[in-house]
């Protein structure tokens, strides 16, 4: 004979209902989507930081080149941006300024790092501009590096380098600018004219 015991509050076996399983799956899905979104944002921020670092290196490179050839600073001025979308004849540069512009142009195109023949070392759409707004002593030179960011921010107002070349929305344009002032190292005592720039 079977022993039948009444099912009371202590003897009741309770299982997981389908609605509880669906709620748990929903919560897990939302959590996984949040984690994926966070991972995407971290990768975007990492790429932006890498591009900013490359821009600083390229900006400092040209500033150092100009400082090393201070006497011929006017020769560094560019009529159009160097780098992406520019054509520059570097087959036989004659002056040091032309050699420096060619080296910088190639660096902007990513010559420093290649993989399978493709140049990878620079920023997306890297462009560089050199302006000489004040050609008399003390001379002033403005070096700018522009590139395409991954998400829209405020459009940089410090330079027009690369403006309008990154799509219809200029808020994707990133830029770094360095201003160099080149003073006179020695004046002629009689005339006051700069002898050694």
Image (cartoon, grey):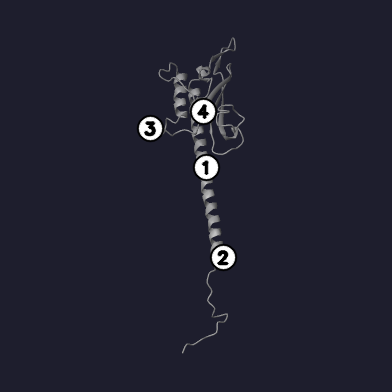
Report if residue 148 is visible in the image. Answer: yes
Q: Tell which of 180 and 40 is nearer to you.
A: 40
Instruction: Identify the residue under disc 3.
Output: 117
Spatial distance from mark 2 to mark 4, Cα to Cα?
57 Å
Quarter of image, res 150: top right
Nearest to the observer: residue 61 or residue 16: 16
Q: Position of residue 37 (x, y in %)?
A: 54, 49
User: Answer yes or no: do the residues labelled 2 and 3 have beta carbons within 8 Å?
Assistant: no
Instruction: Give the Cα separation between the discs numbered 4 and 3.
Output: 21 Å
Of all residues, the one furthest to the top in this rendering is: 190
Label 4: element kind:
strand
Task: Write down the residue under mark 2.
Answer: 19
State the image coordinates of residue 24 (x, y, percent, origin top left): 54, 62
**Circle 3 sits in a helix, a strand or a loop, which is it?**
loop
Q: Which residue is mark 4?
A: 127
Q: Residues within 10 Å of mark 4 (few under 14, many from 20)?
A: many
Mark 3, residues whose alpha carbon is within 10 Å: few (<14), some, or many (≥20)? Answer: few
Q: Rounded to the nearest whole Å, what is the CA distance between mark 1 and mark 4? A: 21 Å
User: Which comes sooner in the sequence, label 3 or label 1?
Assistant: 1
């Amino acid at each position: 004979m079977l022993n039948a015991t009444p099912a009371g509050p202590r003897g009741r076996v309770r299982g997981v209902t389908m609605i509880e399983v669906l709620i748990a799956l929903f919560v897990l899905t939302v959590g996984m989507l949040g984690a994926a979104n966070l991972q995407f944002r971290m990768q975007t921020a990492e790429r932006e930081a890498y591009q900013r670092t490359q821009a600083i290196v390229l900006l400092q490179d040209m500033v150092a080149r100009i400082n090393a050839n201070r006497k011929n600073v006017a020769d560094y001025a560019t009529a159009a941006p160097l780098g992406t979308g520019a054509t520059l004849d570097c087959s036989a540069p004659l002056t040091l300024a032309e050699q420096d512009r060619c080296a910088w142009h190639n660096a902007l195109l990513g010559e420093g790092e290649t993989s399978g023949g493709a140049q990878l070392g620079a920023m997306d759409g890297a462009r560089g501009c050199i302006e000489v707004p004040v050609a008399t002593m003390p001379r002033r030179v403005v070096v700018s590096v522009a590139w395409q960011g991954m998400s829209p921010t405020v459009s940089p107002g410090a330079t027009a380098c690369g403006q309008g070349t990154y799509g219809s929305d200029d808020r994707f344009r990133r830029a770094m600018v360095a201003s160099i002032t080149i003073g006179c190292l020695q004046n002629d005592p009689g005339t006051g004219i700069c002898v050694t720039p």
